[in-house]
Amino acid sequence: MAGNSYGNIFKLTTFGESHGEAIGGVIDGCPPGLTLDFEAIQKELNRRKPGQSEIVTQRKEADTVEFLSGIFEGKTTGTPIGFFIKNANQKSKDYSHIQDVYRPSHADFTYQNKYGIRDYRGGGRSSARETACRVVAGAIAKQVIKDIQIHAFTSSVGEIFIDKPYQALDFSKTENNIVRCPDESSAEKMISKIKEIRKEGDTIGGTITCVLQNVPIGLGEPVFDKLQAELGKAMLSINAVKGFEYGSGFCGAKMKGSEHNDLFNEDGSTKSNLSGGIQGGISNGMDIYFRVAFKPVATIMQKQETINTKGEIVEMQGKGRHDPCVVLRAVPIVEAMAALVIADFFLLNKLYK
C-alpha cells in the first residue's frame, strides 16, 4: 500500500490498523533543538479520542502517545521522531457479521478489489483511528509554527448553521461544549439534533470551519503547490470529508469581479478578504479561512440492503460503537492537518533565506 506519508520537509508517515496492537508514525524533518510541550501534545489527542462525551463512540481508549526516538532531554534532535499509541479497547467480534459483507459507503468493497484482502475489524487501515497519528504530528507542527494561531470549530450539523461570521465568534468558547461550537445557542441545537439522530439509529453530517491567523506573507509554491491546493489535499485526505472551500468558496462564483476584488490598504492589507488570505497560491498576510464538509458516518444502526463477497444481495445492520456525527471529534484533526501544511511551507521558506 502506497500513500502513507504526507509532507515534503516536515513529513509524517503513519502505520497501524484500528484493531491491531498499536497505531503510530514517524515524523521526519522536525528542526533540532525544539523544546516539546508533551502536555500540549496529549491535550490535542484527548480532544480527538473516543468516549469523551455521550454523543460520540463509546470505545474507551486512553490514546496515550509514547515516543521512541528523535527526542533527547525533552528536545528534538533533528532525527526522525518515532511514536506509537497502543490500542487497548478493541472489540473485534463486533465486526464478525461483516467478514463476508460489504458495508454501504465504506472502504470494504474498494479495499477488497484493490488488494485482494481486507481487515474487516473496524475497517483496518481505512479506519479514522489512523487520524490520531496525524494529531500527534500536528501538535508538534503547531510548536514549530508557534506564532501562528489555528482555530477550528464546528460550524454546522445537518441544517443547523452558525449564522455569524467567524470574526464575531469567541474562539475561547469552542471547548466549552461537547460539540465544539463557539456559538452557544447554535451548540445547544446541534447537540439536540445529534441526540435525536442517534436515537433513530442514524447519523448526520456537518461542517468544520478553520481560521489561521498571523500567517506570514509568502507561504505557498506556485504553480502546482499552491497553498490552497495543499490545504485542500490535506483536508480531503481526512476520513469522511466530501468537500473543501476557502475564502469566498462557491459563493464567489455568483459574484462580479467588482464585488469580489479585495482592494488594498496602504500597508498592503486588504479592505475585504474574499481571497481567504491566499492570492496566486501564496499567503498574503490576511486571515486564512476555509470550510470542510463531512458526510454522515456510513455505519448506521438501521437495516440496509448490500452485497456480500459472492455478489448476493443481503440485509445487514450496523453493530458496535460508532459516532452519530463525526465533526466534533474531527475539529482537532482539521487543525492538525492545517498545522502540517503550514509547518511544511514555513520550513521550505526558511531554505530560501
Image (spheres, helix red, strand yellow):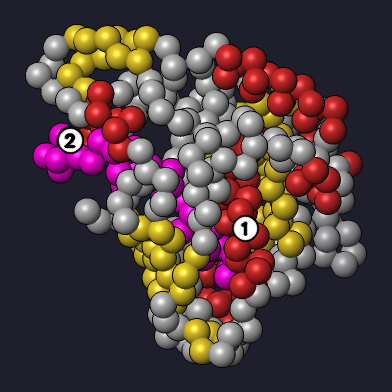
Label 2 sits on a secondary structure element that is: helix
Task: Identify the residue at horizontal 60%, vertical 66% (top origin).
Answer: 41
**Mark nearer the viewer, 2 or 1:** 1
User: Can you tell which mark lies on residue 308?
Assistant: none
* Residue 219 seen in render: no
3D distance between C-alphas at marks 2 and 1: 33 Å
Q: Quadrant of residue 112?
A: top left
- Identify the image quadrant of the C terminus: bottom right
Task: Identify the residue at horizontal 60%, vertical 63% (top origin).
Answer: 42
Residue stretch rendered in magenta on the structure:
113-142
Would you say 128 lies left or right of 42 here? left
N-term-proximal mark, 2 vs 1: 1
Q: Residues within 10 Å of mark 1 (few under 14, many from 20)?
A: some
Let me know if residue 126 is in the magenta part: yes
Q: Which residue is tagged 2?
A: 112
Q: Give the percent coordinates (x, y) of residue 86.
A: 41, 59
Label 1 sits on a secondary structure element that is: helix
Q: Give the percent coordinates (x, y) of residue 144.
A: 62, 75
* Residue 24 seen in render: yes
> Do labels 2 and 1 touch, CB within 8 Å?
no
Q: How many marks?
A: 2
Task: Identify the residue at horizontal 11%, vertical 39% (top origin).
Answer: 116
Residue type for callout 1: Glu
Let me know if residue 138 is in the magenta part: yes
Would you say 229 lies left or right of 105 here? right
Image: 172 above or below 141: above
Would you say 218 lies left or right of 119 here? right
Q: Which residue is tagged 1?
A: 44
Task: Identify the residue at horizontal 82%, vertical 65% (top origin).
Answer: 268
